[in-house]
Amino acid sequence: MKRPTRTRSGAPGIIDVAARAGVSPATVSRFFNSPAMVRTDTKLRIQAAATELGYIRDRMAGAMHNRFSGTIGLVVPTINNAIFSELIAAFSNQLLQHDRTMLVASHSYDPTLEVSLIRSLLERRIDGIAIVGHHHLDSAIEMLNIRSIPVLALWGYHKDAVIPFVGSDNAQAAYKVTQHLLELGHNDIAFIFPETHNNDRARDRKAGALQAMRDAGMSVPDHRIHTCPYDIAQSKQTTIDLLRKDKPSAIVCGNDVIAHGVIYAAQQEQITLPYDLSVVGIGDFTGSAEIVPSLTTVRLPANRIGKIAADAIVEMSERGSAAGFKNRIIETELIVRESTSVVSR
């Protein structure tokens, strides 16, 4: 292995890389800023030289001369939810394929905090930003519009969306799992969803689940609709209270986190799953296939959404607008496992 050498003191620069690769400094600059304009063999020599020298590109210095910083912002509701962790990883890994990095922030379902986070990201000269959901404070979107920063909504689809999006139809996802229970003969179904005021994904799912009931000619009494955050412990306690008071034949959960808590509660109450109680979730999180019984759910393709979104926001940032971008609806998939069965008679 070659020992790092430098033509001057301090950190290696473009001139050092050029000398090691046997090309001009202008070619090295072109490689980092417009790699498509550099021949493949030259790219390999420059990359090898940069690695040998330990060269680190100074993006902020470059940003002073052009409009790109090489950084994309991602704002999510939470990083505690496994499905968002999967989304973040896929988004970040795909950005690396474009030689981009990511700044991620979480607002804990607080739209006011989201405004502050977006402002902070803008101060760091991001090239674009991806945000989860479609309902945001006007001030947040206005900040982005004033600065002509490309913005992309992730995760949910909404027919009235004004922000370009890559996501799935959450209402349809909930419709699918509810319809699955109806087809198994269940008509006494309880629903456990989080507060929907600041969560358009939960709101769409709840609406989709209740629509499936209406389409089947069934009404849902108020005592069958329960509110619980995405928290296993609270879901477990909510379910224990429900089962002790008036056990339904099935429960539709707002996501897999809630569903896991429901399963634990049923086991504690010595209720046999799925014969005495069927349970469905939404998301297909890590662990849902391994829990006992394995969870029937709808798979939300977090990896695919993350990858497509990263490609899209980079393209939008390079073009300077969302012109020509086509919204992407990523299909969900019903995954039938062991937590559901025909209703016991």
Image (spheres, helix red, strand yellow):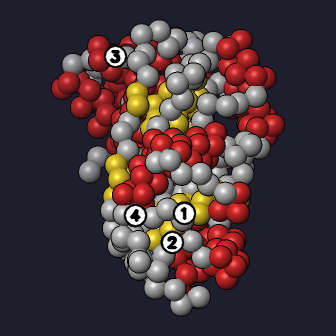
Q: Which residue is mark 4?
A: 185
Q: Which residue is mark 3?
A: 27
Give, as a three-letter code, the residue at label 1: Ile
For the residues bearing labels 4 and 2, Cβ distance under 8 angstroms? no
> Disc 2 to disc 3, how far (Cα)?
69 Å
> Disc 4 to disc 1, how far (Cα)?
10 Å
Element type at mark 2: loop
> Disc 2 to disc 1, how far (Cα)?
6 Å
The C terminus lies in which quarter of the figure?
Answer: bottom left
Give, as a three-letter code, the residue at label 3: Thr
Q: Which residue is mark 2?
A: 249
Give, as a three-letter code, the residue at label 4: Gly
Counting from the top left corner in percent of width and height, residue 17 is at 38, 29
Q: Quadrant of residue 236?
A: bottom right
Labels 4 and 2: the sequence-earlier one: 4
Please state which of the two labelled residues, at mark 4 or mark 3, is closer to the viewer.
4
At 46% from the left and 54% from the top, the residue drawn is 178
User: Is residue 121 positioned above or below 261 on the image?
Assistant: above
Counting from the top left corner in percent of width and height, residue 85 is at 52, 54
Any part of residue 233 in sight? no
> Disc 3 to disc 1, how far (Cα)?
66 Å
Q: Which residue is mark 1?
A: 189
For the residues bearing labels 4 and 3, Cβ distance under 8 angstroms? no
User: Few, some or many C-alpha atoms within 10 Å of disc 4 (few <14, some 14-19, many ≥20)?
Assistant: some
Give, as a three-letter code, the residue at label 2: Ser
Counting from the top left corner in percent of width and height, residue 337 is at 33, 68
At 36% from the left and 70% from the top, the residue drawn is 342
At 57% from the left and 71% from the top, the residue drawn is 248
Element type at mark 1: strand
> Disc 4 to disc 3, how far (Cα)?
68 Å
At 45% from the left and 38% from the top, the residue drawn is 168
